[in-house]
Image (tube, helix red, strand yellow):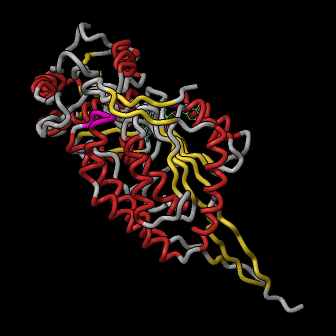
Amino acid sequence: MLQELRIINPATEEQVAVVPVTTPAEVDEAVRRAAAAQQKWAALPPGDRARLLRRFAEVVRDNVPALARLELTEAGHPLGNAEWEANNVVDLLHYAAGGVERLTGRQIPVAGGLDITVQEPLGVVAVIAPWNFPMPIAAWGTAPALAAGNAVLLKPAETTPLTALRLAEYALEAGLPENLFQVLPGEGAVTGNALVEHPGVAKVVFTGSTATGRHIAARCAAQTKRLTLELGGKSPNIVFADADIERAAAAAPGSFLDNTGQDCCARSRILVQRSVHDRFMELLEPAVRSFVAGDPADPATQMGPLISAAQRERVRSYVPEDAPAAIRGEAPKGKGFWYPATVLEGRPDDRTAVEEIFGPVAVVIPFDDEADAIRLANATDYGLSGSIWTRDVGRALRVSGAVAAGNLSVNSHSSVRYWTPFGGYKQSGLGRELGPDALAAFTETKNIFISTEES
Ligand code: NAD
């Protein structure tokens, strides 16, 4: 077991911080403190909870530049992206705060009495976050869980605990009760596992790889513990011949290069109708080559390094930098975990076409007709996101209906809005986060029948 986490700037390979890990005994203590804080939090009038969460949002807003700098330092994200991520936390907290007073039950018609449902908080919720979007994904679970009256124990990824720790400081500064929101850095197999197995944790919200998600699901099943899983993806970007090809090609690089491809929604399988394949590739090449990789602090930079040496080895195990490629961009040389934008021409059953690489690599596969496109789009174990480019609205709706994925966009590659539901089909996950039902996912529904019969 590690004694501490050494945090490395992935753009420079310099050590920027050393963070102590949370031992299983400390997890146990944290759960007990969180349970006590949760009781008081849930007893507060809803309006007071909402006000405190709004204040938390405003403290985060005041510190967006500082949070963005931290994200740049520990995750290598370009500054503009990191600012967007910090602002996303502000929006999530405000959105969740707005839900506190709207978290209502129902009255259901019955004979001989009154039947009502009540939404009760679960208690202590564990949020286990990945390193690819450390701030937003931590907030996806934390904000609605707190708003619904729960306490949250957040376990950030080993490589990116700094923004999470800072958020916990801001929560206290905003006046949230002590121990209500605690951040517990540490290794997944030790600190994360202690949280998952702790009987005092009522729900686990896990975002990460499908393999770890399955392992956690099995541990939770042993205690019938509530669970949300946001897992991997291998999303298709389907370009029909009737689409605005210029627009589709201009959008494609961002859809698999943003966040250096370390994005569960990355459109890393580009399916192009055969009749426009060559034209699409002609347009894609300059668009990929002009996607600027470099110093994350430079405002012109669109793509930073990969998170770690290990992640770069993983990407290389799929495609070494000197392997033949249809398109290859430039990446800085020297220090930093750099990897160039890469486009392969592939076949549907290539390993690179079906497995999640989690790097700036896309595979282009031609298709013949609509049925062929749908078949290829569904030919992976994943089902998280996808894009459909067409001018035919009937086709857009038919294909959206036929592709097994939780988040599809037509003539766009955006997937995530905090006010719309997000989650995966198949091996991409279980349950939904965000959107109008986000708070309800952190409650139990209790049904109460009150007899009106005279005794
Ligand atoms: P990972 O599964 O290795 O780790 C995720 C988190 O789980 C980390 O905090 C880690 O410490 C913890 N963990 C690991 N083993 C654990 C265990 N046994 N018990 C408890 N916790 C444990 O994933 P990663 O490499 O950090 O993230 C990349 C993956 O996340 C990719 O597959 C990506 O697609 C996925 N992801 C999914 C979404 C989504 O919303 N669907 C969003 C972002 C990332």
Determine if the magenta segment contains residue 75.
Answer: yes
Residue occupying image coordinates x 34% and y 19%? 312
Residue occupying image coordinates x 56% and y 38%? 22
Q: Is residue 201 left or right of residue 139?
A: right
Determine if the magenta segment contains residue 276.
Answer: no
Q: Quadrant of residue 92?
A: bottom left
Q: Nearer the viewer, residue 427 or 310?
A: 310
Q: Position of residue 412 (x, y in %)?
A: 24, 44
Question: From which residue to which does the magenta span run?
Answer: 73-77
- Which residue occupies the extreme bottom position in the image? 454
Q: Position of residue 111 (x, y in %)?
A: 76, 82
Magenta segment main secondary structure:
helix
Q: Nearer the viewer, residue 113 or 226?
A: 226
Q: Position of residue 126 (x, y in %)?
A: 57, 47
The quarter of the image holding the C terminus is bottom right
- Check the image and report above or below for 429 versus 143: above
Q: Is residue 95 visible?
A: no
Q: Position of residue 446 (x, y in %)?
A: 69, 67
Q: Nearer the viewer, residue 165 or 17?
A: 17
Residue occupying image coordinates x 53% and y 61%? 178
Q: Nearer the viewer, residue 232 or 27?
A: 27
Q: Is residue 136 visible?
A: yes
Q: Quadrant of residue 256?
A: top left
Q: How many marks?
A: 0
The quarter of the image holding the N terminus is top right
